[in-house]
């Protein structure tokens, strides 16, 4: 595991949005980097490995990597790379039409299941075209509604990426997949106050067992694992990026007591909130 002083924070970008084209520009680096923004990496070609948190992936042609704000990544032995990198913050995503919100929820609320998406030729062709168009728009002369246009392009890209999952229809039917997407959208809005599978099942008008089963088929994780993962991700962000005390974070996330929150956090991460904060920030909680 990397020490705190070996991890560098990604720099801020204007308007919480950036798209870059690269051709051999990605380098292997000894230092790891922590993401300030969500990131989409489209690789047209390349070899090497990419470690995201504790997961390592082989880099190949025609693939996409998704990484969430706060995650740590490191490239290893990268060669002959080309493609595009998009960085965007939550405040920029809010410019995208509401109809695309569930796509972000599906892709970025459970990035452990979606870190790497392998694209077929049709999917790759469509996404390459969209990335080129977005890059051209980003580099165009500024005008009043340009940020809205950029957000619209990002919305289309996110919809296309979310629909890559539909190529796996042999493992689950489309009705269950749409229920799963609706669940992930609800989860992104209510995870602070709703921690039980039964609460989301009621909102979706299905049984808790069915919700757990369809989540397992669509993501490989049960509904409770997805809920807990979202809570842990938010807790880690607050422990790292805010000055709130552990007690304040516990109540903000609707735990009955700091002790209950600490037990939950340790059960899911194998370390206490105080130990996590010390590791990533270097200060005592």
Image (spheres, grey):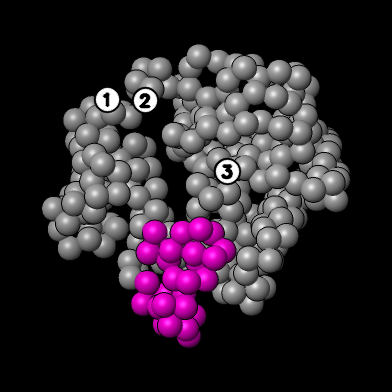
Q: Is residue 203 above or below residue 56?
A: below
Foreground label between 1 and 2: 2
Q: Residue 104, how many percent across, how many down?
A: 59, 56
Task: Identify the residue at the far top of this view.
Answer: 30
Which residue sits at x=44%, y=71%?
A: 212
Labelled disc at residue 115: 3
To which residue does mark 1 refer? 282
Q: Residue 272, how many percent across, how many down?
A: 21, 41
Residue 22 belongs to magenta span: no
User: Which segment is the magenta one?
Assistant: 197-225
Q: CA distance from mark 1 to mark 2?
A: 15 Å
Q: What crowding class fits label 2: few (fewer than 14 Cα within 10 Å), some (14-19), or many (20 or more)?
A: few
Q: Is residue 213 left or right of residue 136?
A: left
Q: Is residue 266 left or right of residue 125?
A: left
Tag 3, which secondary structure? loop
Task: Identify the residue at the far bottom of this view.
Answer: 205
User: Most prominent secondary structure in the magenta stretch?
Assistant: helix
Tag 2, which secondary structure? loop
Q: Earlier in the sequence, mark 2 or mark 3?
A: 2
Which residue sits at x=68%, y=61%?
A: 168
Residue 202 belongs to magenta span: yes
* Residue 189 visible in this rendered orientation of the protein: no
Tag 1, which secondary structure? loop
Q: Say which of 204 and 224 sits in front.
A: 224
């Amino acid at each position: 595991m990397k020490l705190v002083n070996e991890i560098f924070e990604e720099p801020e970008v204007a308007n919480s949005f950036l798209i870059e084209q690269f051709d051999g520009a990605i380098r292997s680096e000894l230092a790891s980097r922590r993401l300030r923004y969500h990131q989409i990496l489209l690789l047209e070609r390349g070899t090497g490995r990419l470690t995201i948190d504790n997961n390592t992936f082989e880099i190949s042609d025609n693939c996409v990597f998704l990484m969430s704000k706060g995650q740590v990544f490191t490239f290893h032995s990268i060669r002959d790379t080309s493609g595009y990198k998009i960085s965007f913050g939550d405040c920029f995503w809010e410019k995208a039409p509401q109809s695309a919100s569930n796509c972000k929820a599906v892709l970025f609320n459970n990035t452990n299941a979606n870190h790497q998406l392998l694209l077929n030729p049709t999917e790759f062709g469509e996404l390459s075209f969209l990335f080129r168009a977005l890059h051209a728009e980003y580099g165009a002369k500024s005008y009043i509604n340009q940020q809205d246009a950029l957000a619209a392009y990002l919305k289309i890209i996110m919809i296309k990426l979310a629909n890559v999952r539909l190529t796996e229809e042999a493992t689950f039917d489309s009705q269950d997949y749409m229920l799963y997407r609706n669940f992930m959208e609800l989860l992104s809005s209510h995870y602070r106050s709703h921690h039980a599978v039964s609460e989301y099942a009621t909102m979706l008008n299905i049984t808790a067992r069915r919700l757990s089963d369809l989540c397992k088929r669509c993501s490989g994780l049960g509904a409770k694992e997805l809920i807990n993962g979202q809570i842990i991700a938010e807790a880690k962000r607050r422990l790292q990026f805010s000055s709130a005390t552990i007690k304040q974070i516990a109540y903000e996330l609707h735990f009955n007591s700091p002790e209950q929150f600490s037990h939950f956090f340790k059960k899911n991460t194998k370390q206490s909130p105080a130990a996590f904060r010390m590791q990533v920030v270097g200060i005592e909680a």
